Amino acid sequence: MSIISILLFFVIFSLVVVVHEFGHYLLARKNGIKVESFDIGMGPELIGIQGKHTRFTIKLIPFGGACIMKGNDMGLPDTEEAKEQAQTTAAAEDSFASKSVWARIAVLFAGPFFNFLLAFFVFLIIVSQSGVDKPIIMDVLEGYPAQEAGLQSGDEIVKLNGSSVHFYRDITLNNNLNPGKELTLVYKRDGVRYTTTIQPKWSEEDNGYLIGVYGGQYYEAKGLEVLVYGFREVEFTVKVVVKSLGQMITSGFSLNNFSGPVGIATTVDTLVDDVQEVTQDESNYTKFMTMFLTMANFLGMISANLGVMNLLPIPGLDGGRLLFCFIEAVRGKPVAKEKEAIVTFVGFVLLMILMVAVLFNDIKNVL
């Protein structure tokens, strides 16, 4: 793995984590909660600066981070003295636990939300520079269902099985997730909409089901289109993550569906190699912009992915804590701290086991 790949990996990984934790930090301070420590990385402290309210640190292991708020400790006190101290801390005016349930929901949701914001701003840059792969058909393959259904070059697909289509990638995603299944397409030609049903055809040459259209050309986005498609890019990434999770649940769990730091670093290295190969005869400016946009796109995808994963109602994640807050909001009183702490602890342990398993699986795949 090259030095460039390693540096880019740390920049991407750190930026995604810092933005996530900054979301928690910003909303905590906005709601009058004391943030005791804002940490980048894990393990022993390398550098620390004590601010007026918060200690900001960079730690030895450059993975992860934390926004440690007063009164947000989910551990179970093991002595009466510790229990009394925890109750005193929780009751303090500037503690997380003392705030209203909606304030706590806002603080917990802010981390994933900031990941979506980061993805949005990154995709704005990409769309403004690279354009959009609008779902416009460039060519129709002879002898395949699309031609038989009357589709022509220049037709724009606007709906697929009842869902709006914004990118040509939507068609590819559907084919990958639902191979061989019948499609209902709504397409636009000369401002008029038409509806047709297509049964994909098996292709021995391509070893997959095809409807027989070519597309994927990028078109310039102008004015407000940049904002709209920046949002659509985040929406598409979220859709990919959610549908992939759904398919994993229905088709079976596999460690290969997950990537840890090693897997992400390997992907970054592959992308760097691909960009260098494609741009080896190009100018330095073209090389730089291609690398920048490729890494920015990966950053946006990782950030949106982290936002979705953290909102899953799994104990140990923001989504798990949010679930308890919503239960409290509905029933009018909090779940007993002891019960929440036990569930969160068990979930955290299982999450750590999964992360270790993913790490070893990533290493095995690399070797």
Image: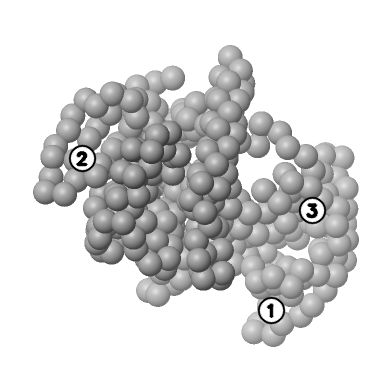
Q: Nearer the viewer, mark 3 or mark 1?
A: 3
Give the amino acid type for the residue marked by disc 1 in the picture: Arg
- Which numbered disc, 1 or 2, marks the residue that appears first in the sequence? 2
Instruction: Residue under label 2, please give it.
Output: 56
**Whole-Å distance between the Cαs marked 1 and 2?**
57 Å
Give the amino acid type for the residue marked by disc 3 in the picture: Asn
* 43 to 347, vertically: above or below: above
Location of residue 94 by image quarter: bottom left
Q: What element carries label 3?
A: loop
Give the amino acid type for the residue marked by disc 2 in the picture: Phe
Quarter of the image with the N terminus is top left
Label 3–label 2 contact, CB within 8 A: no
Quarter of the image with the C terminus is top right
Q: Which of marks 1 and 2 is in front?
A: 2
- Give me the disc on residue 189: 1
Q: Which residue lies furthest to the front in this view?
A: 80
**Whole-Å distance between the Cαs marked 3 and 1?**
26 Å
**Whole-Å distance between the Cαs marked 3 and 2?**
48 Å
